[in-house]
Amino acid sequence: MVVQQNISLKPYNTFSIDANAKFFCEINSIDDLAQVLQLDEYPEKLIIGGGSNILITNDINALVLYINIKGVEIVEEDENHVTLKINAGENWHQIVLWAIDHDYGGLENMSLIPGNIGTAPIQNIGAYGVELKDTFISCEAMEIATQQLVKFTKKACQFGYRDSHFKNAGKGKYVITSVNLKLTKKNHMLNTSYGAIETELEKQSIKTPTIKSISNAVIAIRQSKLPDPAKLGNSGSFFKNPVVSQSQFDTFTKNNLNAPFYKISEESYKIPAGWLIEKCGFKGKRYGDAGVHKNQALVLVNYGNASGQDILDLANTIIKKVQQEFKITIAPEVNIIK
Ligand code: EPU
């Protein structure tokens, strides 16, 4: 465990923002983590995993802890299910592929989501009709103040849409060190209800889908719509889809007859922010090196040398315009680090 100084964070955030960390430490084990958290010379700490859900807007004066604890083990198994304990530093998509290779089902709809296992619970990652919470059993986290390992059950994590305890009361208090997921070994519950998956399977003439073919379909859809962070800096959806009340929804649909929406409860509706942003004319637009992706308006991109502040300025311009046009407030999904 070595604390380095003045390290560029460019390789550690998928937006490829070139900001410096005053202090930086790669964490490869629980012991490393406990040791570094005990050092009193760095009172401020910033924890990063895959760096796929952050926008760094300035150089970081704190100690950046890059969580790179690897390893997967089976902790429980019967005829039908397997429970895996996956350490925080494992790459999410590599684990999805590993699970599919072993014919373990449940993660296939979440193929190709960038980021690491340890950050997945923070925003309850999800895609194509499935969320992390659907296979999640528990996670282990180190309390920063005491270096104690704490177990969080699914209930304790308080998962919501792109939300959890770790974004609310638990914010800044824990480092997630591992996640336990329960997957199926047979009779997989295939979820093809999301329109784009059905269309993609038809396109590939697949009549009896498997977890592998669903994963391939999701990969094809994502590759057609979402930019690859290795080629074009981005953090996936920059904004959350706003949830509106019945009365807001009534006014909105009266004025926008063809707008897509999802009913999420008796009195609330989710409106795709991508649609709102596109209607405001931002899709595919570029302002210096900051831009809005041409195939999915929910994704902001860095064409090369945008600063975090450039991206944030664009995000704020978009929020203002959507508010003016639709009287709907959209909010960032990514963590903005100031
Ligand atoms: N739409 C537009 N214009 C756009 C983008 C979308 O009109 O530029 C419309 C689409 O036509 C569609 C609707 O908006 O009617 C929904 O679009 P899409 O299916 O692409 O999904 P989304 O709601 O924009 C969410 C997640 C994505 C996830 C997809 C698929 C959030 C914030 N985003 O996007 O997650 O991959 O559904 O499940 O919930 C991420 O979190 O980083 C992410 C990429």
Image: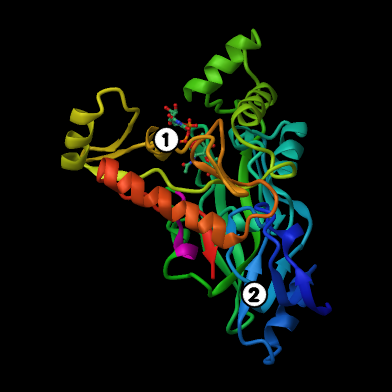
Residue 179 sits inside the magenta stretch: no
Residue placed under numbered mark 2 in the picture: 60
| Circle 1: element type | loop
**Comes first in the chain, label 1 or label 2:** 2
Q: Which amino acid does label 2 sit on?
A: Ile
- Kindly indicate whether the residue at mark 2 contacts the one at mark 1 (C-beta within 8 angstroms): no
Q: What element carries label 2?
A: strand
Q: What residue type is labelled 1?
A: Gly
The colour scheme used here is rainbow
Residue at 62% x, 28% y is: 218
- Vertical placement of residue 86 versus 293, above or below: below
Chain part drawn in magenta: 162-167
Is residue 163 within the magenta segment?
yes
Mark 1 vs mark 2: in front: 1
**Residue 167, position as x, y percentages in the image:** 47, 63
Q: Quadrant of residue 149?
A: bottom right
Q: Distance between the residues labelled 1 and 2?
A: 34 Å
- The image position of residue 26, as x and y in percent, is 78, 70
Along the horizontal axis of the image, is 249 left or right of 117?
left
Q: Mark 1 points at which residue?
A: 281
Using the image as rendered, state which of residue 231 and residue 180 is in the foreground: 231
Q: Which residue lies at the image location 64% right of the left edge and 69% below the top edge? A: 47
Q: Where is residue 179 in the image (x, y as percent from the top left)?
A: 63, 56
Mark 1 crowdedness (10 Å alpha carbons): few <14, some 14-19, many ≥20: few
Name the residue at 64% across, 58% down.
118
Q: Can residue 135 be seen in this view?
A: no
Say if 64 sits above or below 283 in the image: below
Tell me where residue 129 appears, x and y as whole percent. 48, 33
